[in-house]
Image (cartoon, rainbow, N blue to C red):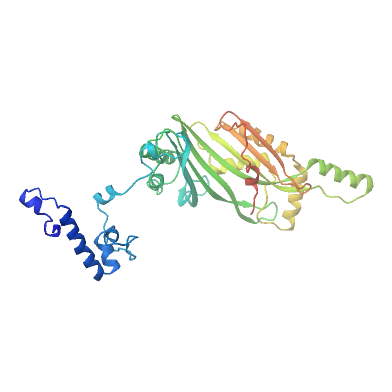
Amino acid sequence: MNIHMIGLEEKSGLDLKPGRAEAEAALATLRAWAQRATEAEIAALAPGAGALVGETYPVLSREYPTDFVVTDAYKDSMPDLQNGPASLIVGAKQVIQHVGISNFRLPIRYRTRDNGPLTLETSVTGTVSLEAEKKGINMSRIMRSFYGHSERDFSYQVIEHALEDYLKDLGSFDARIQMRFSFPVKVESLRSGLSGWQYYDIALELVDKAGVRKRLMHLDFVYSSTCPCSLELSEHARQTRGQMATPHSQRSVARISVELTGDKCLWFEDLIDLARAAVPTETQVMVKREDEQAFAELNAANPIFVEDAARSFCQALQEDNRIGDFRIVASHQESLHSHDAVSVLTEGVTFAADSLDPKLFASLYHVG
């Protein structure tokens, strides 16, 4: 039987190919052995042995193989559907502009203007373009490329190195990295001398499209907006009728997105300072009675419609030569109405768009 012929062909140089009779005899021997063997022994013999001995479903091992070693030959034998041929493509053979990973989290050490290096939990989105004739990409390569640089203090130069690595690894023509984190800044109260930590949602983005790279920064700035119309009407009621009245104010959010130009650094704190100078009614962290009164006075001194907010931020950004194109999306989450007042202001082509994400303004809610 063929069980005696293993290796015999190689040793003797003979062409010893078993015939049907020998195969039937070997199968009978295998089935006789299987009647006395356990399921684990059958599974250990070969993955498909169960089918040979008459099992309708292959008998598989249920024990984790702690001593299994992956060899190069074994890795070469493993299927790789993402890198398969174009014949495996499902749907239209069309270029995909962005495909990759989102919310891949790890601690990243950032350089800051005021507090030196600071390690923050960061959510990373990494995408590349996919050619029409390619089935898919290896998602883990994006993560591996990023980990290769994650121990360094992050700057845009370091992000560029990570992007170059996965552009090369994945053979793509466009790529994008976005890193989101919550950035802490200690701020002083208005009058009491207290201080507390204010947290700012910030995202850094590096875009490589057709070989042209853009460095972008996004900031969510949270402020109070007192309605100028409501303020005037309240004062009118007081003066003409002696009627107590209060203007309506609301927590408001502006998402400020800027393209960085030139060689001078725009620190996170710099963009926060620009926003605070444009609209000084930033929400407060630590508040005593004197601070609350001061905040009421500050709002009365700076009443603001959503249009005013967008234009105030715009003026501050235009005056900084480190900033090129920009976009301001503002949402005043009304206490008078059951809807919000919103505005979008863009400068340049980078952020210009004919359509808005249907969830854009909903994403501006500050939940504390």
The residue positioned farthest toward the bottom in the image shown: 36
The relative height of residue 113 versus residue 38 in the rendered view (above or below) is: above
Residue placed most toward the observer, 111 or 139: 139
Horizontal side of residue 237 vs 149, given as left or right:
right
The residue positioned farthest toward the left in the image shown: 12
Q: Residue at x 86, y 43 (%)?
A: 233
Q: Position of residue 277 (x, y in %)?
A: 65, 40
The relative height of residue 281 versus residue 325 in the rendered view (above or below) is: below
Name the quadrant of the C terminus.
Answer: bottom right
Horizontal side of residue 202 vs 89, given as left or right:
right
Residue placed most toward the observer, 285 or 357: 357
Q: Residue at x 58, y 38 (%)?
A: 257
The residue positioned farthest toward the right in the image shown: 241
Name the quadrant of the N terminus.
Answer: bottom left
Q: Position of residue 98 (x, y in %)?
A: 48, 38
Quarter holding residue 309: top right
Residue placed most toward the observer, 14 or 294: 14
Q: Position of residue 93 (x, y in %)?
A: 44, 34
Q: Residue at x 86, y 46 (%)?
A: 234
